[in-house]
Image (tube, rainbow, N blue to C red):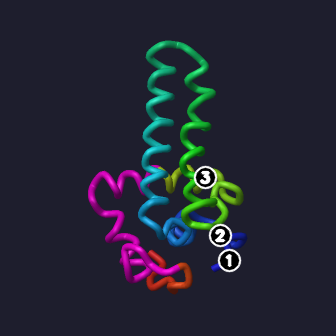
């Protein structure tokens, strides 16, 4: 499925997982998402708006490094910012439950599938 034709989050999720095939890239996303949440929390608790400005930098920085240097692809954020943010939290939730490797395997047949591994399931 072409990324441009995605209309729903259910359609986006397999595309997103496919762009996060390597465990190190996923780990960098977990760090970034967790740090961004921490910045937002610190901003709320302290009232210091600089934490809110830092949240996207510390959130997307590690994630984009994972895409450009580990995965070798373009971040999904560039074409689907809203769905991508939702998927970042879904992926982190799966990871915290110990289910993300199972989800990658369900969709692509391995917890660390090859870049050309075909999509096996759509939902």
Disc 2 to disc 1, C-alpha distance: 7 Å
Name the disc covering residue 2, or none: 1
Name the disc covering residue 59, or none: none
Q: Nearer the viewer, mark 3 or mark 1?
A: 3
Q: Which residue is mark 2?
A: 6
Residue that lies at the very extreme toward the left in this rendered image = 98
**Residue name at image x 46 percent, y 35 percent:** 37
Question: Observer-nearest residue: 85 or 75?
Answer: 75
Contact, CB < 8 Å: mark 2 with mark 1?
yes
Which badge, 3 or 1, comes first in the chain's sequence?
Answer: 1
Disc 3 to disc 2, C-alpha distance: 21 Å
**Residue name at image x 50 percent, y 83 percent:** 119
List x then y, in percent, for residue 115: 54, 79
Contact, CB < 8 Å: mark 3 with mark 1?
no
Element type where label 3 sits in the image: helix
List x then y, in percent, for residue 46: 48, 13
Residue that lies at the very extreme toward the top in this rendered image = 47
Element type where label 1 sits in the image: loop
Categorize mark 1 by other alpha carbons within 10 Å: few (<14), some (14-19), many (20+): few
**Whether residue 40 is situated above or below residue 85 in the rendered picture:** above
Q: Which residue is mark 3?
A: 64
**Residue name at image x 48 percent, y 20 percent:** 44
Categorize mark 2 by other alpha carbons within 10 Å: few (<14), some (14-19), many (20+): some
List x then y, in percent, for residue 75: 63, 59
Q: Nearer the viewer, mark 2 or mark 1?
A: 1
Q: Which residues are magenta?
A: 89-114
Instruction: Tell me which corner region of the image, top left, top right, bottom left or bottom right, holds residue 52.
Output: top right
Disc 3 to disc 1, C-alpha distance: 21 Å
Which badge, 3 or 2, comes first in the chain's sequence?
Answer: 2
**Residue name at image x 63 percent, y 80 percent:** 1
Instruction: Tell me which corner region of the image, top left, top right, bottom left or bottom right, holds residue 72.
Output: bottom right
């Amino acid at each position: 499925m072409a990324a441009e034709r995605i209309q729903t989050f259910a359609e986006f999720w397999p595309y997103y997982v496919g762009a996060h095939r390597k465990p190190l890239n996923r780990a960098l996303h977990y760090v970034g998402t967790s740090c961004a949440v921490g910045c937002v929390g610190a901003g709320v608790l302290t009232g210091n708006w600089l934490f809110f400005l830092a949240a996207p930098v510390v959130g997307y920085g590690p994630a984009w490094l994972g895409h450009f240097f580990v995965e070798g692809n373009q971040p999904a954020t560039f074409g689907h910012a809203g769905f991508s943010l939702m998927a970042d939290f879904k992926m982190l939730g799966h990871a915290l439950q110990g289910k993300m490797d199972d989800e990658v395997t369900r969709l692509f047949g391995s917890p660390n599938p090859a870049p050309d591994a075909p999509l096996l399931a759509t939902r």
